[in-house]
Image (spheres, rainbow, N blue to C red):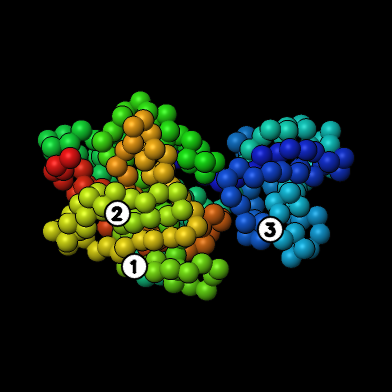
């Protein structure tokens, strides 16, 4: 449910808002982008010097809401106020979409669609949990897992693509199906949970790909180490340009994820 953004840490004399990260923002992709505060005030992200010299330091950024002084800015925004990226959802060609906050609105959509068709007649007790502060250290899933004490915890999230020019390497690609997480720096997924997901996909003809990343993580990490330990897995949608106002994903992959969420909820585990 959460999304990356910024928090105001200082208001300059000329009305510019200095900010710090809430989650991981790329200074380069934020630069000249639009943001919106909870009260509806909009702003544009600028930089104290050239964006190249900022070297991805968000502390070098500021937000211009149009204020002419500190006193003027404080009529609209206070220190501690938060904002997120602002931009429309758009349809691209070839069943692809672009939007802010696909990380992790995609996961919310998939769980809601799966929940609509869950009649409660399967072999498992399923808890659909919508967490916040995943982007700040997988915090929301910690108390949720502690409260529920599940046997298995599955994170439903996105994962960065590797099929376009970028600074990442791996096998993740758009339109190659829902990605089944094997590992990331925060978790090594349970082999039986991974095998169950693969079995579900093969039995129901759900297109899937195997996901391994060497940067990043999901709520699977905190569920995994909750209590006396939880068997963890991940269902993730490959996404280009994550943590920006214009992330790109495939509708086909998203819908494949819905099908896997439904299938795994009906799978009979022998723990």
Q: Secondary structure at mark 2?
A: helix
Residue beneath label 3, please?
Answer: 56
Distance from the alpha carbon under mark 3 to that under mark 1: 30 Å
Apparent side of residue 35 relative to residue 141 in the rendered image (left or right) = right
Return the mark for residue 240.
none
The mark that comes first in sequence, 3 or 2, is 3
Q: Residue at x 68, y 58 (%)?
A: 56
Q: Residue at x 32, y 44 (%)?
A: 232
Counting other residues with Cα less than 10 Å from the Cα at mark 3, is it few (<14), some (14-19), or many (20 or more)?
some
Distance from the alpha carbon under mark 3 to that under mark 2: 33 Å
Residue 251 spot, x, y in % from top left: 34, 60
Residue 50 spot, x, y in % from top left: 78, 63
Residue beneath label 1, please?
Answer: 175
Q: Is residue 20 above or below residue 178?
A: above
**Do residues under tags 3 and 2 come within 8 Å of each other at their CB atoms?**
no
Q: Residue at x 13, y 58 (%)?
A: 203
Apparent side of residue 265 relative to residue 28 in the rendered image (left or right) = left
Residue beneath label 2, please?
Answer: 257
The mark that comes first in sequence, 3 or 1, is 3
Does the image show residue 206? yes
């Amino acid at each position: 449910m959460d999304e990356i953004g910024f928090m105001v840490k200082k208001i300059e004399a000329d009305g510019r808002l200095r900010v710090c990260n809430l989650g991981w923002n790329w200074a380069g992709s934020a630069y000249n982008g639009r943001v919106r505060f909870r009260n509806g005030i909009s702003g544009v992200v600028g930089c104290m010097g050239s964006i190249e010299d900022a070297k991805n330091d968000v502390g070098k950024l500021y937000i211009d809401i149009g204020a002419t002084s500190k006193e003027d800015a404080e009529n609209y925004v206070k220190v501690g106020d938060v904002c997120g990226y602002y931009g429309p959802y758009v349809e691209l060609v070839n069943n692809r979409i672009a939007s802010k906050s696909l990380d992790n609105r995609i996961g919310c959509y998939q769980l809601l669609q799966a929940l609509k068709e869950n009649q409660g007649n399967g072999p498992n007790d399923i808890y659909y949990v919508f967490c916040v502060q995943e982007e700040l250290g997988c915090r929301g899933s910690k108390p949720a897992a502690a409260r529920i004490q599940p046997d298995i915890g599955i994170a439903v999230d996105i994962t960065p693509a590797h099929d376009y020019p970028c600074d990442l390497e791996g096998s993740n690609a758009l339109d190659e199906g829902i990605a089944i997480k094997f590992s990331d720096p925060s978790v090594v997924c349970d082999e039986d949970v991974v095998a169950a997901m693969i079995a579900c996909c093969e039995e129901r003809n759900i297109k899937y790909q195997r996901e391994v990343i060497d940067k990043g993580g999901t709520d699977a990490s905190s569920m995994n180490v909750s209590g006396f330990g939880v068997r963890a897995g991940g269902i993730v949608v490959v996404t280009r340009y994550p943590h920006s106002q214009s992330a790109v994903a495939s509708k086909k992959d998203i819908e494949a994820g819905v099908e896997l969420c439904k299938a795994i909820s009906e799978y009979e585990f022998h723990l």
